[in-house]
Amino acid sequence: MDEEVREFLLKHLQGIMNNDIASYHETTAEDLTLYEWWVTPHRLNGLPFHEFMMTANAGRGTSFGAEGTGQTRFDLSNLYIQRYGDTAIASYTLLISAASDSGVQVAAHNESRVMIRMGGQWKVVHVHKSPAYSAPHVG
């Protein structure tokens, strides 16, 4: 596994979980494109969408992808990194665990993140998320 890309990815995701907009800007390209299946069936462009979400989450005391204000964590299941020079693709199942008065809830979805080294720094340029449940044709 490419440790440089893995460490960058963890930093990027932790910044999102912490609602850290400065870290998000440091690790994400301005022309980011992404598909987030639970938000809209259309492509989202740029940083303002997540800036708004992170600011709103910070104001409520919550983390990205978690309900409530309890302790949260994320794990990457089946992380696989493909690197081709200054381009890397990470694919995994993102597990977000959130503690609440009723116990721990875990949300899961599949993600691919495309990263490019630009000016000596890695940046996320594209994200694609899909649900982590059985396909309708599976019986």
Image (cartoon, rainbow, N blue to C red):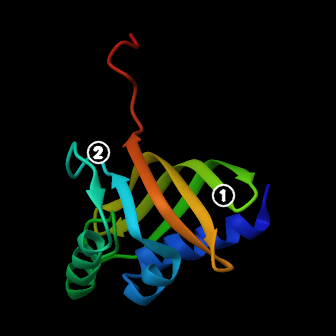
In-image side of 116 versus 29 (left or right): right
Disc 2, SS: loop
- Residue at the image position 47 percent from the left and 79 percent from the top: 15
Badge 1 density bin: few <14, some 14–19, many ≥20, Cα 10 Å: some
Q: Is residue 85 visible?
A: yes
- Residue at the image position 74 percent from the left and 52 percent from the top: 84
Disc 1, SS: strand
Residue 101 is drawn in which quadrant? bottom left
Could you say where residue 116 lies in the image, as x and y percent from the top left? 60, 64
How many tags in the picture?
2
In-image side of 4 versus 50 (left or right): right
Whether 77 is drawn above or below 139: the answer is below
Could you say where residue 32 lies in the image, as x and y percent from the top left? 40, 64
In-image side of 31 versus 68 (left or right): right
- Nearer to me, 31 or 70: 31
- Nearer to me, 3 or 68: 3
Q: Amino acid at mark 1?
A: Thr
Mark 2 → mark 1, Cα distance in angstroms:
24 Å
- Residue at the image position 58 percent from the left and 47 percent from the top: 91
Could you say where residue 11 lies in the image, as x and y percent from the top left? 58, 76
Tell me which numbered mark, 2 or 1, is placed earlier along the sequence.
2
Badge 2 density bin: few <14, some 14–19, many ≥20, Cα 10 Å: some
Q: Amino acid at mark 2?
A: Trp
In-image side of 7 versus 19 (left or right): right
- Residue 113's mark? none
Residue on which disc 2 sits = 37
* Quadrant housing the N terminus: bottom right
Could you say where residue 75 lies in the image, as x and y percent from the top left? 56, 60
Residue on which disc 1 sits = 87
Whether 10 is drawn above or below 54: the answer is above
